[in-house]
Amino acid sequence: MNQEDIKDSDIDIVIGALQPDLTSFLNEWRPVFSRFHLIIVKDPDLKEQLNIPEGFDHHVYTKPDIEKAVGASSTILFSGYSCRYFGYLVSKKKYIISIDDDCLPARDNEGNLVDPVAQHITNLTTPATPFFFNTLYDPFRDGADFVRGYPFSLRSGVTCALSCGLWLNLADYDAPTQALKPQQRNSQYVDLIMTVPARALLPVSGINIAFEREMVGPALFPALRLAREGKLRWETIEDIWSGMCAKVICDHLGLGVKTGLPYVWRSAKGDPIESLKKEWQGVKLMEEVVPFFQSVRLPRTATTTEDCVAEMAKSVRERLGSVDPVFNHAADAMLQWVKLWKSVGSGSSTPGGA
Amino acid sequence: MASPSTVPATPLLKDELDIVIPTIRNLDFLEMWRPFFEPYHLIIVQDGDPSKTIKVPEGFDYELYNRNDINRILGPKASCISFKDSACRCFGYMVSKKKYIFTIDDDCFVAKDPSGKEINALEQHIKNLLSPSTPNFFNTLYDPYREGADFVRGYPFSLREGVATAVSHGLWLNIPDYDAPTQLVKPRERNTRYVDAVLSIPKGTLFPMCGMNLAFNRELIGPAMYFGLMGDGQPVGRYDDMWAGWCMKVICDHMGWGVKTGLPYIWHSKASNPFVNLKKEYNGIFWQEELIPFFQSAVLPKECTTVQKCYLELAKQVKAKLSKVDSYFDKLADAMVTWIEAWDELNSTGKKPSGNAK
């Protein structure tokens, strides 16, 4: 689908609210967000009322809404940062853009305000090139192209289904790194968009992402919950887990994943040293999962994202279940998610949507 | 807690690195590079008419080889070195005795970064080669060893040591390295985008390696950097670096070494004639459709424990699987074997061949 054909009404912006007062957050984002429909999901564990400024076309979902939609026992799935997944579930739009509530608009090297919605949509509506690396990065950008030696048969690319953005100021580091380098701030605006090559694994951060809802939605799920998961990003690993699953599935289905622009400006919050105690489980688990993800293969019969998730859940249980019980829970949650996606999810976005 | 860290100076490596330059015209471009290149030894490989004298600017320490020298030094094995094509540069890799090679084209000049500062491309290549690569897991903040960057959340700790870097692939501002069809369609396109990143190309991923601005650890990967049979009497040109890059990447993946791409930029000043290029590339454009699946599926057996063994195995597979594409690949496979024989001969005795050294 061409970018010119995308309407504002094809897009939902999903915000997981982990803090009650979204006034300054939304006011800062107003120039970018005001055109779009917002889905705001309040962390079911958050007690306070949400404070949302005027002038946004939005829908708020709180704990009672979640319980009504998925049942009380499944509400735990959407606790903390995972609340945003409920927004993905109930959206009916073609594209979802999701940004953490502690992120603000960034500026590029010329001082211009970055519109992450526009950039994510550009990423998603231009082809990805996962089968061969282009040394000038995204060949579909203005002023760039495929370089000499790039096979012509691979130049039409594949659909980009997932766009992973980055963060200036407080980058998405884990707790040990942040504890070791408390002053480190990411000030490097790297003017780069690239396709992550097929079979390459990467940590997909949930802080600033966008995706084609029907293609990837079933593969982005709240499944890996740490025993002491907390309300700070470096106390979670849920996005890393689902991102790796999503990458394997995209590789299998021939869909592309891009990384790079757009940047958002992320602000500091919390004490990483405190979080070290909570995050350590996540760090250890990552060591177990990498060999699994590098070698997992999905059967040719899995041709839809939902099928792929079911197959992945099976593999997770078979190969990781005995390593740590958290993986059995993850496999269960993945299957539960697919069930919810089929029953609560709206399926097709818009009739006649490409 | 920590005081602002002082960035350690990048070592010059002036006794461990050779700069290999192929040329047929002159080396005037070296004047611009003088502040950065003067400490280093140059190996100049003169292509084309050996009776022509190439003038090297004063003050550079160099050795120069023309076709007569190549024939004299290699004897019958000289058949593996291309004639009338910059692919002849790989002869320079072979005769070098240094640990690192930096190769650059004679139409590549010093570029400026966005702040207006002149870029010391060689220094950046050295930084790239001396720091690890991370091909086994992609870091979304690119090179984690760069000042101001790090591994992101979720990056497995056991992979944070990285692996040895074998190749550093630099880029070009101004005239981009496009193929002939693209040049014909976009004659005015210039690369003006300075992308401030170095990244490791993931294991299992192939890329088009351009020889214009390239550095590598010769001790690690040198034997794999054969630039093939191009130019005079050959059915294809402008695929020398491509061929070397595909062989090199398969071998690096097998040996567990990394390949970086991105910074440094140089300023590429000369746009070659697209009609001439089209004639040279013509066969390559069709052949690469077969070559890419070949390299993507190439498997090197566990017994290939040295680069030479890997390369000879690849040559065997080229002969077995690509001869049916064109008899050229039969010849190329033989030349690959000759290259390794010549490499081992020149590099085992420690004997230094005599070029026209200064």
Image (cartoon, rainbow, N blue to C red):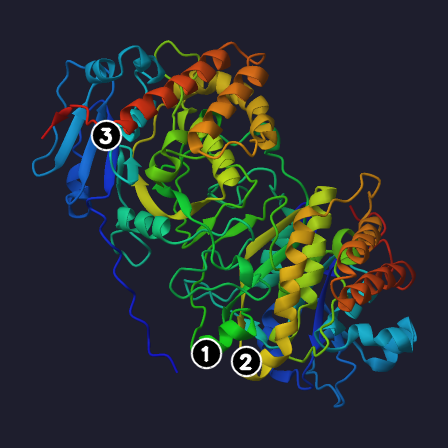
Sequence-wise first label, 2 or 1: 1
Looking at the image, residue A99 sits to the left or right of residue A193; the answer is right
Amino acid tagged 1: Pro
Tags 3 and 1 both on a single chain? no
User: Is residue A50 depicted above or below A148 in this figure?
Assistant: below
Tell me what residue is drawn at x 30 percent, y 59 percent.
Answer: B115
Residue A139, position as x, y percentages in the image: 53, 41
Residue B82, position as x, y percentages in the image: 33, 17
Foreground mark, 2 or 3? 3
Residue wearing tag 3: B350
- Give the secondary structure at mark 3: loop
- Give the secondary structure at mark 1: loop
Instruction: Report how far apart the C-alphas of labels 3 and 1 lie in the structure.
Output: 51 Å
Q: Chain of mark 1?
A: A
Q: Check if mark 2's residue and mark 1's residue have beta carbons within 8 Å.
A: yes
Tell me what residue is drawn at x 26 percent, y 12 percent.
Answer: B75
Residue B256, position as x, y percentages in the image: 50, 44
Residue wearing tag 2: A272
Residue in the foreground of this view, choosing between A103 and B262:
B262
